[in-house]
Amino acid sequence: MRVLGIETSCDETGIALYDSEAGLLAHALHSQVTMHNEYGGVVPELASRDHIQRLLPLVSSVLAEAGCAPRDVGGIAYTAGPGLLGALLVGATFGRTLAWAWQVPAIGVHHMEGHLLAPMLEDPAPAFPFVALLVSGGHTQLVEVQGIGQYRLLGESLDDAAGEAFDKTAKLLDLAYPGGPQIARLAEQGVPGRFVFPRPMTDRPGLDFSFSGLKTFALTTINQHTGPGGLPDPQTSADIAHAFQEAVVDTLAIKCRRAIEQTGLPQLVIAGGVSANRRLRERLQEGLVGKAKVFYARPAFCTDNGAMIAYAGCQRLLAGQCEPLEINARARWPLDTLPAITA
Ligand code: KG4
Ligand code: ZN
């Protein structure tokens, strides 16, 4: 089955064509980052309007790249939530309309299930069951995954998501949006050990997270070292970025190790924008030697993209799931309410 995937939950328009036999045929992405940058974050209404303009040209280019015509598409998968409601509705309306015009089934995909399954597009792919660490701009969750739609939440952030903490700390250092890659770049110049940030909630049992205190710790440290320009000098900023990143990465690694020990599962999948972080990947691999193998997607498939939606949607369409003609999107959508696919 050949499925067209449509991702519009936030500030990236992603389109992809996935074939259940041949794999990923083509994918394309338009990022709105430069448009939102001058506002320091995503402006929802601008995001929705931009998705409208980008969708059709991106679909045409993906079909052309794959050498396919609309009649070769057997199903449509679009992100139905969670995310920005307006942006979601653009993708859902577009996807449903294409499905009606092309007379094929359509399915609304859970954005975090898309992230969770993105490493399946790589070789070697993880095999069920595994533990997944989902780390994006809106979510930080540890999930035991028995199969598609068989998710048991092991722990989650009680306040800010890991990506959100990166973005907020980057803003304090006057770095551009999105802050994760900027902090990661700056941290490379940082002197290890000059600052030491706390590892929140690692001194007690459990698999939940809390990242909002790290942002406050960063603020206090920045204020203590602010120079004449209203910011610390460049080396101090790099040292703070380094200490912040180490704290986030270390905290995530400690909880992942705990989840692996608790479940006894020998595979860890990391997914979502923060899983693109090189230091996180290194630290997890070091920390899980002899305990678990770590799987992740290529960086372009860690952040939002159409390929993960096409893949997840294809699995559900193959299992006979599809949605009626109504157009639905959900700004909030608990992952553990999804229907399971059982063999
Ligand atoms: O998955 P994603 O593209 O969108 C959401 O579903 O939220 O994740 C975006 C988040 C942002 O907070 C961004 O700063 C973070 O992922 N991110 C990173 C890196 N690349 C993206 N955080 C740390 N290091 C990175 N290399
Ligand atoms: Zn995402």
Image (cartoon, rainbow, N blue to C red):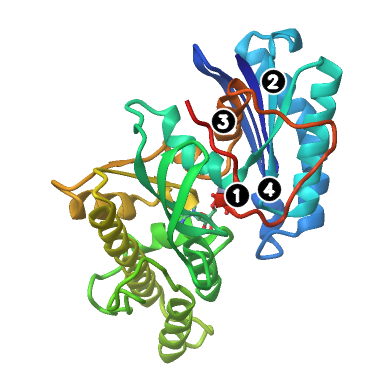
Disc 1 and disc 3: Cα gap in Å?
Answer: 23 Å
Residue type, numbered disc 2: Gly
Q: Is residue 9 left or right of residue 159?
A: right
The answer as to whether callout 4 falls within 8 Å of ligand 1 is no
Instruction: Identify the residue at horizontal 32%, vertical 79% (top origin).
Output: 198
Disc 4 and disc 1: Cα gap in Å?
Answer: 13 Å
Give the residue furthest to the bottom: 224
Q: Residues within 10 Å of mark 4 (few under 14, many from 20)?
A: many
- Disc 4 or 1, which lies upstream in sequence? 4
Location of mark 1 (residue):
337
Residue type, numbered disc 4: Gly
Secondary structure at badge 4 equals: strand
- Disc 3 or 2, which lies upstream in sequence? 2
Of the 4 image quadrants, the one containing the N terminus is top right
Residue type, numbered disc 1: Thr
Rendered image: mark on residue 270: none
Q: Are marks 3 and 4 in contact (CB under 8 Å)?
A: no
Q: State whether residue 71 is above or below residue 219.
A: above
**Mark 3 or mark 4: which is in front?**
4
Q: Is residue 220 left or right of residue 340?
A: left
Q: State whether residue 172 is above or below residue 245.
A: below
Disc 3 and disc 4: Cα gap in Å?
Answer: 16 Å
- Disc 4 or 2, which lies upstream in sequence? 2
Instruction: Identify the residue at horizontal 75%, vertical 46% (top origin).
Output: 88
Tell me where residue 77 sits by quadrant.
top right
Residue type, numbered disc 3: Ala
Location of mark 4 (residue):
81
Rendered image: mark on residue 75: 2
Instruction: Identify the residue at horizontal 70%, vertical 62% (top origin).
Output: 38
Location of mark 3 (residue):
307
Tell me where residue 120 sits by quadrant.
top left
